[in-house]
Amino acid sequence: MRLNELNVHERRLWDAFPQGRRVDVSTEPAPPAPPAGSAPPAPSAPVVRAEAIAALLLGAHAEPAPGDRPALRLTGAHITGRLDLGFTEVAVPVLLTDCRFDEAPLLQGARTRQWVMTDCTLPGLVADTAQIDGRLVVSRCRLTGPLVLNRTQIHGDLDLRDTVIGFPGGEAVSAIHARVAGDALCTNLAVEGTFRLSGASIEGEFDLEGAALRAPGANALDAYHVRIAEDFTFHPGFSAEGRIILSGATVAAAIGFCGARLSNPGDIALEAVDVTVGRNFDLGLGLTVDGAVKLDGTRVGTELSLRDAELTHQDGTALSLRATQARETDLRTRRPIDGVVDARNARLGTLYDAQDTWPTDLRLADATYETLAFPLPAAERVRWIRRTTGDYLPQPYEQLAATYRRLGHEDEARTVLLAKQRARRATLPAHTRLWGHVQDAAVGYGYRPLRAGLWLLALLACGALYFALHTPAPLDPGKAPPFNAVFYTLDLLVPIITFGQDNAFAPRGTGQWLSYALIAAGWILATTVTAGISRAVSRQ
């Protein structure tokens, strides 16, 4: 492009380029008044052609003199035509402020020093496979088309703060396998369409504080298998309509959703399967979710928290923690979770919960926890376990009993194991259930051994009183020992052991039936005590 082909604004930019001075064409002074009687000139719009900018950036200007620091700094321009820098090398920084583009700039495959766009309006930006040696800034801008950063390498920060990007029904931001050596700053970013950065790598933090992502019925954020070296922050003020996908992500520090609002009614609102978090995964402190939260297989280095969160997913699994691992887990939600909480095979570490916010349907099959921060009486915890719907499962009872034992509460552990046997009894055939009721009444399945002594004393008192008043006749008066009602009753009640009384006397009538009843009761007590002792010793 020749100098005589440049308009006034382009010439100013051309002259300022070697020293990197800022050119603000929006403050261009008004032209002088025309001579009297002549027609007024057409208004001078601040137009700068894209080809003029490209020519400057690609070396059309003379070689810089010693001491020059070339840069393109342009403010307030209406840039016409396509700014096409695809597969070129731009050796100077570019700073565009308050500019309006007719067409989406093309930086595909380009290598630039630094690219900064602030307060600009443009129909998209295509910079896939580009290499930015410094920062890439698209801040406070308005894009009516997609921002494409697939496999882009940014050696500084990616700054999208306060930008609005609209591409409904498609990928408004596409940064698949992008590499950012600094931070990804997306504070107050507003996106209409999918924000996709699956496979991306960010060496700093990823900040979405106050961002609003909207893709109803689709993926609002697809961050599958991303790697983030510091924090992944969605709080406070973050909101999303559509699914948030974090599955397979690796976050060296923490993930935070405090105060966020996620909405994907009837479907998964947050999918974070097989995520690895170095420190905390915070889903509490005001988080509101309309839809399911799925955290299956996620590994949390310190604490997984849902404290003061609100989760709603009626007629489905509102919170899935299957095979999740955490050193601490806080389930003290603001109100009971509306939907199923599935913690099967989870490893929850220290578990914090609150009785008034227990979920209606809690599934704990094969879930383990080191301790309960608030153990509560065993009878209350048994009601917690029994919130599980479906078939009888022994493991949750055994896990709870083991927890009480670690705390030194052996009596509470026995209460839990007794409840386990009663729950099991309900699954047995009728005749087996009858025998279970007998064992329960007699010795509490071995976990209430004092009951056997009380039964023995009661039967002994009844028998001794009756036979003291109705002495049975001796079988051989000449050889029979003196009758003792207490020892005679003991002979009937206690199998094997004999005091020589029951073989020497023969009751008649009612006494005979009472003796039969005492013998049967003795065998039942002996059998149930033996079974109970065996069960207690084996810790079943």
Image: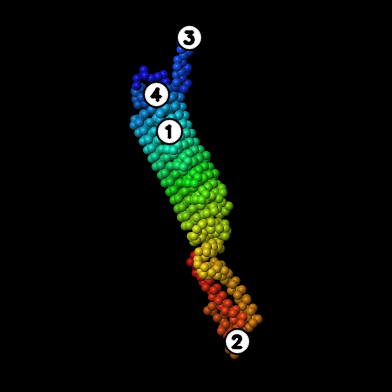
Judged from this view, the residue extending furthest toward the bottom is 478
Closer to the camera: disc 1 or disc 4? 1
Q: Is residue 343 above or below residue 22?
A: below
Q: Residue at x 53, y 44 (%)?
A: 288
Mark 4 secondary-structure assignment: strand
The span from disc 1 to disc 3 (Cα, nearest Å) is 48 Å
**Quick one: label 3, few (<14), some, or many (20+) residues within 10 Å?**
few
N-term mark: 1 or 2:
1
The residue labelled by disc 3 is 36
Closer to the camera: disc 2 or disc 3? 3
N-term mark: 1 or 3:
3
Q: Which amino acid type is marked by label 3?
A: Ala
Closer to the camera: disc 1 or disc 2? 1
Mark linked to residue 474: 2
Q: Which amino acid type is marked by label 4?
A: Arg
Closer to the camera: disc 3 or disc 4? 3
Disc 3 vs disc 4: Cβ atoms closer than 8 Å? Answer: no
Mark 3 secondary-structure assignment: loop
Judged from this view, the residue extending furthest toward the top is 36
* Residue 128 image offset from top left, x and y in percent: 37, 35
The span from disc 1 to disc 4 (Cα, nearest Å) is 21 Å
Q: Is residue 122 above or below residue 227?
A: above
Between 79 and 206, the residue placed more toward the observer is 79
* Residue 502 image offset from top left, x and y in percent: 57, 82
The residue labelled by disc 1 is 145
The span from disc 2 to disc 3 (Cα, nearest Å) is 153 Å
The residue labelled by disc 4 is 49
The span from disc 3 to disc 4 (Cα, nearest Å) is 33 Å
